[in-house]
Amino acid sequence: MLPGIFWIVPVAGVITIIFAILLTRNVLKRPTGTPKMKEIGDIIFQGAWAFLKRQYTTISIYSAAIAIVIGVLVGVLGGTEVEGLTALDIGWRTSVAFLVGAFCSGLAGFIGMFIAVKSNVRCAAAAQQSLTQAVNVALRGGAVSGFLITALSLIGVTVIFFAYGGQNNPQIAPHLIVGFGFGASFVALFAQLGGGIYTKAADVGADLVGKVESGIPEDDPRNPAVIADLVGDNVGDCAGRGADLFESTAAENIGAMILGIAAYLATDNIAWILFPLCVRGFGMIASMIGLLCVRAKENENAMNALNRGYFVSIGLSVIGLAVTVYLMLDNWWLFGAGMVGIVASVVIVFITQYYTEARYKPVQEIAEASKTGPATNIIMGMSVGFSTTFATALVIGLALLLSYWMGSESGVIGAGAFGTAVATMGMLMTCPYVLSMDTFGPITDNANGINEMAGAGPEIRRITDRLDAVGNTTKALTKGYAMVSAGLAAFLLFQAYLDRVSFIKFGESGLYTVVDIARIEVFVGALLAVMIVYLFSAWAIKAVGKTASKIIEEVRRQFKADPGILAGTSKPDYARAVDITTRAGLREMIAPGLLPVLGPIVIGVVFRYLPGGYDAAMVVAAVLMVGTIGGIMMASFMNNGGGAWDNAKKMIEDGQLKDENGQVLGKGTFAHQAAVVGDTVGDPLKDTAGPSLHVLVKLLATITLVMCPLFISV
Amino acid sequence: MLPGIFWIVPVAGVITIIFAILLTRNVLKRPTGTPKMKEIGDIIFQGAWAFLKRQYTTISIYSAAIAIVIGVLVGVLGGTEVEGLTALDIGWRTSVAFLVGAFCSGLAGFIGMFIAVKSNVRCAAAAQQSLTQAVNVALRGGAVSGFLITALSLIGVTVIFFAYGGQNNPQIAPHLIVGFGFGASFVALFAQLGGGIYTKAADVGADLVGKVESGIPEDDPRNPAVIADLVGDNVGDCAGRGADLFESTAAENIGAMILGIAAYLATDNIAWILFPLCVRGFGMIASMIGLLCVRAKENENAMNALNRGYFVSIGLSVIGLAVTVYLMLDNWWLFGAGMVGIVASVVIVFITQYYTEARYKPVQEIAEASKTGPATNIIMGMSVGFSTTFATALVIGLALLLSYWMGSESGVIGAGAFGTAVATMGMLMTCPYVLSMDTFGPITDNANGINEMAGAGPEIRRITDRLDAVGNTTKALTKGYAMVSAGLAAFLLFQAYLDRVSFIKFGESGLYTVVDIARIEVFVGALLAVMIVYLFSAWAIKAVGKTASKIIEEVRRQFKADPGILAGTSKPDYARAVDITTRAGLREMIAPGLLPVLGPIVIGVVFRYLPGGYDAAMVVAAVLMVGTIGGIMMASFMNNGGGAWDNAKKMIEDGQLKDENGQVLGKGTFAHQAAVVGDTVGDPLKDTAGPSLHVLVKLLATITLVMCPLFISV
């Protein structure tokens, strides 16, 4: 029998979808500004559409192939029968779940980006009226994406859970739906990678050939790559991060359900398995109310308005958590564990601000180092990026220890790990709100670009400029949030993996619990995992460079073929630049995308069949665990370092750097040029490799969960 | 009773010392060139001397403090009695061993550098006669350092082993001498860090203020920082790397002896414990003969001559290994394990060349990326550096798996891990030769600088220029060698740690073998370990930046105070620049130096006393193991990436980069300026943080070995 409180899941799901539809209608009916603005908006829309079509075609082909491979591998090599299901049964169910997960993830990214692109031009137009209106458009446009994504993830997991017999066999169904999480993270990796490569290649390419070579300003309509640059903001930040957090919520939800099985078996209370779904339902309602509370005042920093809404969401989430725990688990230790997750999400926001905002020391040190040139700027930025791992590791480590301890103290069977699951769920309650703030970023960024290109007045530009700066902050915060959620979720996903290995190997969970890194093969597996993180990063940033060079070639070609472009008398061929970026970006995404998918499978299968009596399942566990550590530390370096470089440049542009005589070192000075180099280096780190690493970490978890039958010799 | 073959240890030790004395006399009696050259040589000598005096004073103070802390901590908190020794007994013995190790390491670095500095000017002078003579001086000067260091390490370990009752209680003595390894690695870390910070700060500072700001060439005598730069090559590359490999050989030797205890107890044959000492004795003889075979021909690449000698050493080492295995262990599987180590050392040399030499793709890609500016150069270099982890991880992983497997097949008790120990010993046999080649680098680099400053003719400069390029290669190879030896040794040092924990906890070895990373506290420990690697790197490279800014200020001050300096009419105050660099460099070395020393201790002690029933010894084991993985991967990125950046710049300077019209893009072009930025960024990575990370990895091992009584609740 389902617990009474379970009504929250369908209700929250339906309400959220209605909410998203209302927001969409609200945004779409707004004016699109001057004909010039509308024209630019249309071009961006077409470019984004063209990219998404191609990208999702590619992803669909790979998804179909992977679905077949999973089915065949698990079905054939998977081994024994588990609780009445043959390997073949598990295989096809996993394949179908994979396809559903992949489809939902793609759909979420697609719709979110559609609305975001439509919101850009309306936000630009709204800035003509007031700041308040512009904030409204940007936040509501972002919220469509944020809420739809989380709703789809909640509904998707719920439906497939029940479709696979969750009500009658709750101890088996969570194992069958891991494919959903894998599908979601597979698409997320490609969406984040493809989008990340596209956006930074277009950005770097447009800057190098425009600002550096031809001396025309940023977002100048004469630059053929300028539309590609604006399209990039959407495909990277909206579609990419959306897919990232879609799979986060899905994979972590499923992992938490698997961990609930032990308590379910001990108590025969299905609430342990359904708890993650319900708590997320409350989180969506809390986020929705928080969002409705945002009222930007005309003369305040828009960030304050966003923060007010955020704190309302947090407060309501705490209440929602308390209610769910009380009604479903009735154990206040677990409420404490959930609170750990919520607090961690707030703490990381402040830490991210410290490392990436110009009013604190790290960014100032980078700006200072720019005085002696690009080399010292890079060295200092790298140092700042490296040192951010301290705070990241400390927050994740403390949150894990505390929530695990509270889980253990709860006295429930297996609840140490379940404590970390509750913490993760607590943290993810505000996910729709955070995601709305995140998408706020590219919308305001684009609105600013559209106003620049359409030649809007200085008063209007000032508004979108200010919103753009706020958007940079919210983007950075979301990355911190995604990173810590990946770290917090890591432990619960490991335990889910071990549980699943135990289940397959011994027919019940809890019998396979040790991952002994003092065994030679396990140590080597751990070494290879960290190597995969480095190699993936290498390929991802190299892909940006390669794609950027294609754009640069094309822009040079257009300038050469038609001198009228630079003179401003003829129009550049934006569409061709977009098309070339699209093709190159998608081609370059394949190799880094397949590495973390194939890597763990190859390692696991090789060790399974190698003579020497190696425990391949344990090797893969080490790949997962140590790969997660390596990935999170590298992502911390890249995201925060990149953000700091970016803001050091902005700080100089704002005239906040002075030489020893008190003279301002602003735009165009040697220091500024050095800071521009730092920003350009940071770009592929913070917008391509870094965010993709969050996805990689979770992909490692879902792929090992799904593929673990392959690694077990029975 | 000692095995008959043991005579090789004292004989090799004594012969090596005599050999080093003869080499020293041979070098010192050579001419010191023109008065101008002699003058410059003297200034360098004084600067180096001043640095070493200050540096070793600082290190002595810290060493004394640490020795007391070790004694007190182990003595008081150490717990129970082990085989008749109280905690207090173990405490003071460890302290004394620590001091002896620290002293030997310091002495080795000191003498080696003394001779190297004396060789510089003689190498410069010899270049006036012939290339052959110049090679002879540089190689012999380097060999003093290489051979003395390994001899001191061998003799030191042997003496202290017998002094602590090794002959009567061979199962206990190795545990008591771990302090020697800790002392050695403690000094090595500070030597490498302090030297690395000094050398790169001087280099970066001199370049930025000289080449960039004032437009005077490299090594120009008008630059007040030029002597500091030359001094830096000696204190970083000679003293630093020497101390690094001193502690490598010592720590790995001791670890291997600990692993031999199990087989000794089973067979009552002390040969298992003494094997590492004997095999190293043969290695020294093999290296000596190899060195004597080097005869540079006037018209060939000096690298070929060095390679011939290297292959002679390798061949003789294989024979020496076979003889030792036959006489002492009589088990050919273990000979195979040793061969794995030797082969791995050769393979890594080729791989390092692939990633860092201009004739291969990676460096060419970086040079190519320089065409679009410093940002793309940095991105590409980072990508190359990241991707070198692939080869590093593969070589280390395969060598570990193979040697462990051969050890297991040998049928000897505990010989899986002992197999990796034999592999490490096999690899380290040629250490004296490799170290001689390494010190060849800074000597030729300095000789080249001296010739430049003394205004030597173009023919002579051509010779030292060519040798300098060879020196760059040998330096890069040594780093690869040190890195793989650290990786290979890692596993044996872990096992030694677990053995020691078992010994303390249960009174015998082999009972504490599992490091379960699926436990929450162990996972968090692993996370913190990787964080320490990042934070250490952050501080190390930041120290370079901070120190460099002090030099820049001083040079600017001198140029301002006396315009005659730039005009060439008055002499700059070299000594003051040296002194300022020394003070700043040594101050900046403290924080990063103490981090890896205190980090593991704090983590271990905190988890020991935290409520929650954590296994602190296991947490520390994870810190050691995963920290090693993180450290080696980061070092691979930094060393190889830095080398690649350096050579991409050299490739452009050699006129090997062309634009699309076939025009050479040489010195002074936009591409070259971009490549200079990359080189400057790479400098602190490859010469400060990267090499220090090797030491850090081994320091983690020795410190946990020594301090493990603190982590065990009994």
Image (cartoon, coloured by chain):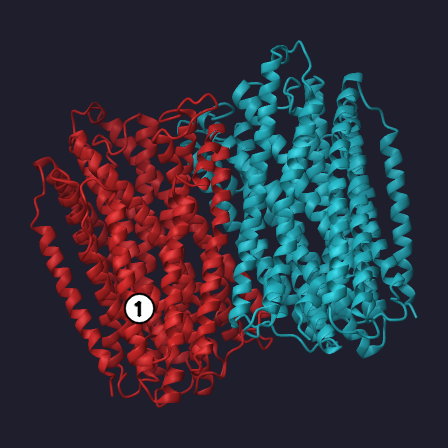
Chain colours: A cyan, B red
Residue on which the image places disc 1: B250
- The answer to whether residue B250 is above or below residue A12 is below
Q: Is residue A206 left or right of residue A135?
A: left
Q: Is residue A186 left or right of residue A21?
A: left
Q: Examine the rendering and report whether any part of residue A294 can be seen.
A: no
- The answer to whether residue B41 is above or below residue A488 is above
Which amino acid lies under the numbered mark 1 shown in the image of this protein? Ala
Front residue of A538 and B539: A538
Front residue of A287 and B421: B421
Which quarter of the figure is the N terminus of chain A placed in? bottom right
**Residue drawn 69% across the image and 39% down it:** A237
Count of number-bearing discs: 1
- The answer to whether residue A257 is above or below residue B164 is above
Front residue of A417 and A561: A561
Q: Position of residue A72 (x, y in %)?
A: 75, 60
**Could you tell me which chain the residue with mark 1 belongs to?**
B
Q: Secondary structure at mark 1?
A: helix
Q: Is residue A601 left or right of residue B51?
A: right
Q: Quadrant of residue A660?
A: top left
- The answer to whether residue B389 is above or below residue A224 is below
Q: Position of residue B326 (x, y in %)?
A: 31, 78
**Residue drawn 50% across the image and 33% down it:** B375
Q: Examine the rendering and report whether any part of residue B325 can be seen.
A: yes
Q: Is residue A643 left or right of residue B232?
A: right
Mark 1 surroundings: few (<14), some (14-19) or many (≥20) residues within 10 A: many
**Residue drawn 69% across the image and 28% down it:** A578
**Residue drawn 24% across the image and 84% down it:** B2
Q: Quadrant of residue A267?
A: bottom right
Q: Position of residue A83 (x, y in %)?
A: 82, 75
Which quarter of the figure is the C terminus of chain A placed in? bottom right
Q: Position of residue A605 (x, y in %)?
A: 63, 64
